[in-house]
Amino acid sequence: MSVKVKIGDITIGGGERIAVQSMSVFKPSDTDKAIKEALVLREAGCDILRYSVNDEKDAKSFRFIKEKVGIPLVADIHFDYRLALAAIDGGADKIRINPGNIGGENKVAEVAAALKSSGIPVRVGSNTGSIDKEFSDKYGRNEISLAESALKNVAVLEKHGVHNIVVSVKASDAPLTIKAYRYISSRTEYPLHVGVTEAGTEYMGIIKNAVAAGALFADGIGDTLRVSLSADPLREVKAARAIIAAAGLDDNFADVVACPTCGRCEWDCMAFADKVSRYVANIKKPLKIAVMGCAVNGPGEAKDADIGIAGGKDCCVIFVKGEIKKKIAKEDAEREFLGEIDRCIR
């Protein structure tokens, strides 16, 4: 089990729940847009939000944004150690750096001193585009070179007395990501930030992340998750929440199960299931809802659901824990069933 690390008011590692992270499409210095976006992401379940820091104005914006949105903010720093120092001073709850590209040893030492003084954590790691030549020459492009590159960055910080560390080892394909995290989890106790980097557009990106994160979560590996997508960050947050829930690691949501349909189905079960899913998207309590294709098998197949509906040629039935509660006309199904859901969550 990993050690615990505190990021703002969120604690990760050590058996804490898996935190969802995303990354803003705005500069933090564009504060109005950044705040508006952050509030939407927070409502959707984003626990930690990262920003690219390109200049000193960006670095000074963290404290102001944080006061407005109330979630931990991470500063992503490259090439300029002074921006890391400014972001720490500006109120960032965590920074993400690559010790190898922010200057020489003395610059790393300055950042390390600021990290220790502030008490905030730092994320370091590697991806398939930043594998250290020493390890790629020795091992090739594989999980060992990827993980050992990250561990080299960890060692640089440890040398300067920094131990409040989060580690990542991301690839753009699921198999290598899985292998790299399995390898590094046996070599370090620092919390691991997981995900597939540069995963692609929404559809394939979600599938890649679900495969990788699902396999790692089943092994007990992973403390934070970002589902990297070439899409709105809101889609990242919703996908991450769904992956964590599907892995059985969060039951504080409404789970809609639905019949895949067949030739017996005589109502638009698929469209109805989609309406129900959108209706309960923001419910944050355990609830299992079933939308089934026919009244013959529906209540039996979904008898463990808290509430369900099954359609037929002329009517629908609403059932609770497998027992039929009422029979209704199909034209009344949406109003009646959503009303029953409302009663369940009161």
Image: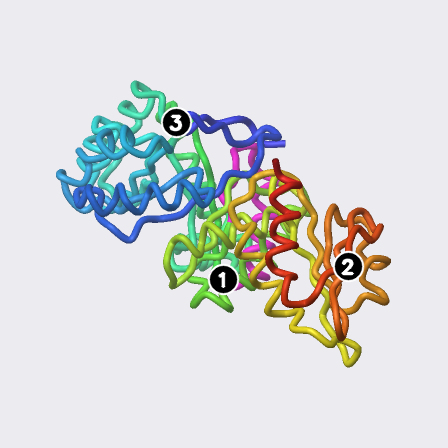
Asked whether 132 or 346 is in front, the reply is: 346
Identify the residue at horizontal 59%, vertical 41% (top origin): 185
Measured Cα–Cα span from mark 3 to mark 1: 35 Å
Measured Cα–Cα span from mark 2 to mark 3: 51 Å
Please name the residue that numbered disc 1 is placed on: 141
Badge 2 amino acid: Lys
273 with respect to 302 (left or right): left
Badge 3 amino acid: Gly
Give the position of the C terminus as an image quadrant.
Answer: top right
Please name the residue that numbered disc 3 is placed on: 8
Outermost residue, top direction? 117
Find numbered disc 1 in the image and state the secondary structure of the residue it sits on.
Answer: loop
Please name the residue that numbered disc 2 is placed on: 327
Asked whether 345 or 10 is in front, the reply is: 345
Which contiguous range is marked in magenta? Answer: 172-194
Please say whether residue 235 is visible from this viewpoint.
Answer: yes
Identify the residue at horizontal 22%, vertical 31% (top origin): 64
97 with respect to 145 (left or right): left
Identify the residue at horizontal 70%, vertical 48% (top origin): 288
Badge 1 amino acid: Arg
30 with respect to 175 (left or right): left
Residue 216 position, x and y percent, is 63, 49
Measured Cα–Cα span from mark 2 to mark 1: 61 Å
Q: Would residue 8 be counted in the magenta stretch?
A: no
Identify the residue at horizontal 70%, vertical 61% (top origin): 291
Location of residue 48 (image quadrant): top left
Mark 2 or mark 3, earlier in chain: 3
Outermost residue, bottom direction? 263
Q: Would residue 183 be counted in the magenta stretch?
A: yes
Q: How crowded is mark 3: few (under 14 residues within 10 Å), some or many (20 or more)?
A: some
Q: How crowded is mark 1: few (under 14 residues within 10 Å), some or many (20 or more)?
A: some
